[in-house]
Amino acid sequence: MTGKYSIKDLERLSGIKAHTLRIWEKRYGVINPERTDTNIRYYTDDELKKVLNIAILNNYGIKISKIVGLTAEQLHQKVIEISNEEVSEQVQVESLVVAMMEMDEARFEKILANCTIRLGFEQTILKVVYPFFKKVGVLWQTGSINPAQEHFMSNLIRQKLIVAIDSQGLMAKEDCKKFLLFLPEGELHEIGLLFYNYLIQKAGHKVVYLGQSVPLKDVIAVNKYNPAQYIFTALLSFTSIEEINATLQSILDAFPEAHVWVTNRIEPNEGLLEHARLTTNSDIEQFKSFLKGI
């Protein structure tokens, strides 16, 4: 796959203003646009990777006048060196993006490991992995990554979450509550659900985890044996408010004694279903506070 990016795409992906990129292009020849048959300027995958690497060094405090003197190999090596240091979360997020685009598993792993040592697992997820996924969303919109790259990084992060969940053990506190976690049919964004699983177990509560794309009838069947007080799900792939509300109502009807938590991208003022047993769009801190109080 070969991407074609406008200067605005480079701005969105790197955080460097288009005006600044134009100045750097003119003054230093940092990037070199190509042109379509109709004379429209665009930038390639290689140019995007170069800009992302430059953004990492620039955010680290290295002046552009120094960066432009580096060869491609020196630029690559300098970025790797920096990602091993105690640098800002923004730099680590950008380093993860480059590692993903280059399918560099060793580098991806090292960045996550360094962040975990410095910040702890939970803060790494909140301050590095979540912002990284937002960048990935932009990359998807511009066609900058393919399914192989997306699966590559998702599986690595998924493995980290599963290990962290396993490390919590099966010890629950005496007055623990029971949560049932699942994603409805067609919903495949499992990373967030795994992180909530981790938070719930860390707080000393029990979890029945069913995973992604589970038919509601199967969830009902599982819940019959030992009903959960709380149902947790996510509707991130659903875009129609009618479809979202119908799904939420089906879940509420299926579990009349449980409180339902759901994460989604629709704001309440956009017509999202309201119900006494339904909490939507909660952020991580709100959920953590809730866990402490039950």
Image (spheres, rainbow, N blue to C red):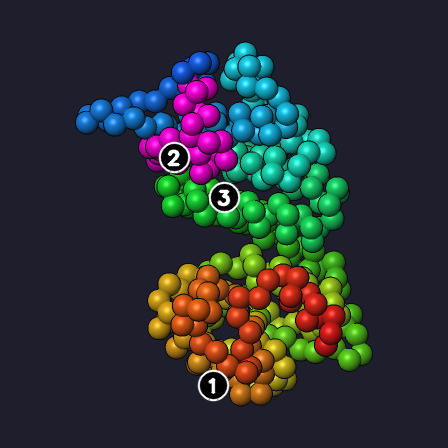
Residue 2 rendering spot, x and y as whole percentages: 34, 32
- Residue 199, compared with residue 1, is above or below; it is below
Quarter-wise, where is residue 41 in the image?
Answer: top left
Given the image, on which type of amino acid does mark 3 rest? Answer: Lys
Q: Residue at x 44, y 34 (%)?
A: 11
Q: Which portion, as a residue range, is magenta?
A: 1-25
- Residue 255, compared with residue 210, is above or below; it is below
Q: Residue at x 39, y 77 (%)?
A: 246
- Residue 9, compared with residue 208, is above or below; it is above
Q: Residue at x 42, y 61 (%)?
A: 237
* Prevailing secondary structure class for the magenta stretch in the rendered image: helix
Q: Secondary structure at mark 1?
A: helix
Given the image, on which type of amino acid does mark 1 rest? Answer: Asp
The Cα atoms of the two marked residues, 3 and 1, are separated by 36 Å
- Between disc 2 and disc 1, the foreground one is 2
Q: What residue does disc 2 label? A: 8
Q: What residue does disc 1 label? A: 253
Q: What residue does disc 3 label? A: 135
**Residue 22 painted magenta:** yes
